Structures are given as C-alpha cells and as structure tokens.
Amino acid sequence: MTKKRTAVRETIAERLSEDQRERYGEFLKDVDLHLNLSRKQHDILVSDFNDAIEYYLDNGVSFEDALSRLEPSNLGGFYAHPASTWFPLDNAAIIYPLSMRFGQMPMFRLSAYMKEEVVPQLLQMALTFTIKRFPSFATVIKAGVFWHYLDSTKKRFSIEEEKVMPLMPISSMRIQSFRVLYYQNRISIEYFHVLTDGYGGSVFLNTLVGEYLRLQGHDIPCEATVWDISETPHESEMSNEFAKADLYKGASGFMGRKALQMSGRIANVIPARVLHFEMDGKKVVEVAHAHNAKVSAFLLSRMFMAQKFATEAHSGEIRMQIPVNMRKFNGSRTMRNYSMYFSCDMTTDKIGTNADDMIPDISRQMEEKSSKEEMSKMMSTTIKLVQSVKYVPIVIKRPVVKMVYGFLGDKIFSNYLSNLGVMKTPEALHDYVEKYDFILGSSTVCRANCGLITYNDRMVFSITKSTADPTFEEKLYELLTEDGIDVEVTGSALYGR
C-alpha cells in the first residue's frame, strides 16, 4: 500500500470515534472478503472506497450513512470469483475487430448532463458496483483461430476525466472496450461497437447514472432503462439474437453503388468537430405533423436538402443509412448488438427547392424498408455471410470480409441518421438529469454522421463532422429555423482541418 493511501486511511481514522474506528476496520475487512484481485488492483479499489468515505465526511454525510451507501455487498461476488466465461461475438459485431486492421474503430457515445457537477469519487464507485450487472461489458477482445471473441476479465474498471476530443480509438483494448468519462456536469460513455448498440448503451449509462445518484443519497427506482444492479444478470440479456433467427428465403445485399458525398475536404484530424442542435421536442413533433411526417422523415427531408447544397456535384444519388432496433419485433432484452439498417435514397434531380415534396417518398421508403420482412432479409444475409467464412482463419478472413461486407465502403452512404427516440427513464431521474446527447463515430468518407435523442421534451440532434466545411450544418440550421423551430447550437470548436 502506498504512503498516500495509508495517509488517507489514517486521516479518516483520526476523524472517527473509537467505536467508529472499530466499525471502519470491520468495514475494510468486509471489502477485502469481496476481493480476489492482484495486489495492485486490490489496493486501488480499496483506495476508491476510502476516497468516497472521505468525500462523504467532507460534505456532511454521517459516517454511518457513508458506510451504508458503500455497503461491500454491492460488490457481489464479481471481484471475488476468477474470470471464467467468454462470449462469441454477435453477428453484427463480428466485422468490427476486423475493421481495426484498416485504421477504423467503429464507436459511439452517449452522454447524460447532470444538473450538478459530477463527483468523480462517487462516479468511480458507481461504476465499480454497476459493472457486475453487465457481464458482457466486463470483457476484453481476443483473437481466436477463426473469430475474435469477448473474454471475461475481473479488474477495477476506471473512470477518466475527459481531456481529449471525443470518440478517439481505445488504445488499451486489452484492458476494456468502453470508457467512462466525466467533464463538469457531463457523464459520457464511449463504446466500441463490438460490445453493444445504442439501446444497450443507453441501459448501461442510465443504470450507472441511477447508481451514482443512489450514492448521492437519492431514491431512484429501478425501471425502464435503469436496471437493478443487485439482480442476477439474465441469460437473455447476453443473447446473440442472430443465432436464434430463422433464415429468410429472400436476400438483402450490403453492397451498393457509390453514394454522392459532400464536397468538403476530409480533415487531418477526425472528428473535425462535434455539433449539437438543441430543440424543443414538442415543437419539432408539431412541425413534423404539420408536414404530414414523423420526426425522422421530416428531419431526413431537411438533411437531403442540406446534403445536396453541400456538394458541387450536379448529379448522383444521396443515400442515408438508418439503423433499426430489432428488439421492437420480439421484445428482446439483449445487451448485445441487435440492430439492422436500411437506406433511404434520393437522386439529386428529385431534390428541389421545397423539402416537403420529398416527404411522401421518404415516408414510404421508411415504412417499407424498415418492415419486419425487409429487416429479416437483411438479418438472414448477415447470418449467411458469417456462415460462409465461418471456418476461414482470421489471417485469411480479413480481406475476404472486407470485400463481402464493404466495411470500408462507407462510400455507399452519404450520411447517417440514428434516432434513439425518447429516452425512457424513471420520472425521478428528471430532477437530476438535464438532457442527453448521442454521438456517432467519424467516417473516413462521409463528411457528417448524425445522432438524435430526446429526453423530457428536449431533442438533441448531434452532428459528427469529418470536414471543417460548415456548409451542411449551416444549411440545415437555416431550413429548421425557416420551419419555425428555435435551434440552439452547442458543441466543440474545430479539432482539426
């Protein structure tokens, strides 16, 4: 144990009565009983408990209440049992580790903005208590002979103060495949897509936030996307739903013609910028309905207009990728990837001066292409492609999978719109969480990727830029304000040109 950690323990002991010191010693022994880690990991984790106790004592929380909130039973058996399980990658995730070979790391980020500044000592403890509820997240990525897989690891998962640009590749893949960040009042989690999709990411974030608030002394019920961390994980939550799917006779291809791209030069540093359009959710819904459209179709019509305005090409096809949460078809609770996608397409000659003219076609495409039948075709294609290279060694598989999936073929899409919809949380969370945002990782081809999330009538439309050229977002802002929607623009300065 380091001198610093010993000093912290002695400092706490000096502030306690004789009876409390005895209780404190018993408490630390109880923590030890729940830990079977390396000496270094053990000491750091015990130090986290002491840091939290010291924070509580400094902020008027009684010693008894502090120990109650930090009850060692919250650790469960997670840190006491050796890592012994592993998870084959789900069919949607299989491509992601292979793509790293070509300089890509598909990632996304979800952030909760608290109404008060984040307390790192309590956020660290919240993560320490929460991770056991999500076994497929407490993993590292390893390479087998034929496929990569997720291997369980037992360690202290750490939080970090946010100091660099968002969604940088995770260099320490042998340690963990996600990162928890805090900055002022913001709690963010950045995920390597191999772990989960947007739904799974939202459940993990909200469960972490719920536990963080509990450690602050607030009563947050476990419902919706806030799970009970003391509950034993269900097998269904770790299910690869692709393995259960019936193969569909039809087929849906991954490859396609090149899509029209914006004209801005790809920046040397990507993301070049992250922007957020914050809007009144009720107003956006009202305007969309006035245009006989759902929110996604309404926004896509404006995105098509802005995309065309941002290119100097005179002809071509603009193609938007739209993910679909497959859980809506069968009620699955899996935390693994369980999303498919479709494309909404429009040739430039059909994009005139009135965005509303496109809405009927966009709405038709969204309804037809996101149907259970069409998504089942896409899922069947995914399964068949995986099966076709199942027994091909990884070293040979990389170029084959690159060709079949075209994961470097961002060229077949012009932009992305991933709408997570309305974030469903316990009502009690509204008193402590101001808003959320959802950021997609950068592309090496598409100049902008867009994510949308709504919470408590606050809609945040986020744009991840791969170019410094501001034409797309400026035109989109203009179109939305012309529709009578007040748009507050926040976000970063330019990271790079």
Image (spheres, rainbow, N blue to C red):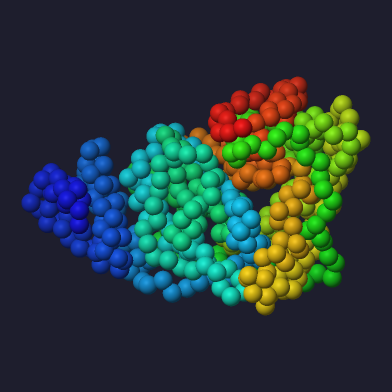
Residue 468, picture quadrant:
top right
Q: Position of residue 243 (x, y in %)?
A: 67, 72
Check the picture and name the quadrant holding the N terminus: bottom left
Q: Which residue is more in the foreground, 422 or 160?
A: 160
Q: Residue at x 79, y 49 (%)?
A: 412
Seen as rendered, the residue at the extreme bottom is: 391
Tell me the quarter of the image containing the C terminus: top right
* Quarter residue 485 falls in: top right
Does residue 69 appear to the left or right of 301 in the view shown? left
Percent from the top left, x then y, of residue 305? Answer: 81, 32
Observer-nearest of 100 and 324:
100
Q: Residue at x 61, y 46 (%)?
A: 441
Q: Residue furthest left?
A: 18
Q: Residue 435 at what x, y percent from top left?
A: 53, 36
What's the residue at 48%, 64% (across, down)? 139
Q: Position of residue 298 (x, y in %)?
A: 77, 36
| 213 in relation to 42, above or below | above
Q: Is residue 340 visible?
A: yes
Residue 373 visible at all: no
The residue lying at 85 percent from left, 67 percent from top is 250
Question: Does residue 95 appear left or right of residue 53 in this picture?
Answer: right
Q: How many marks?
A: 0
10 vs 77: above or below: above
Residue 168 appears left or right of 470: left
Q: Residue furthest right?
A: 349
In the rendered image of this protein, does residue 256 appear above or below residue 380?
above
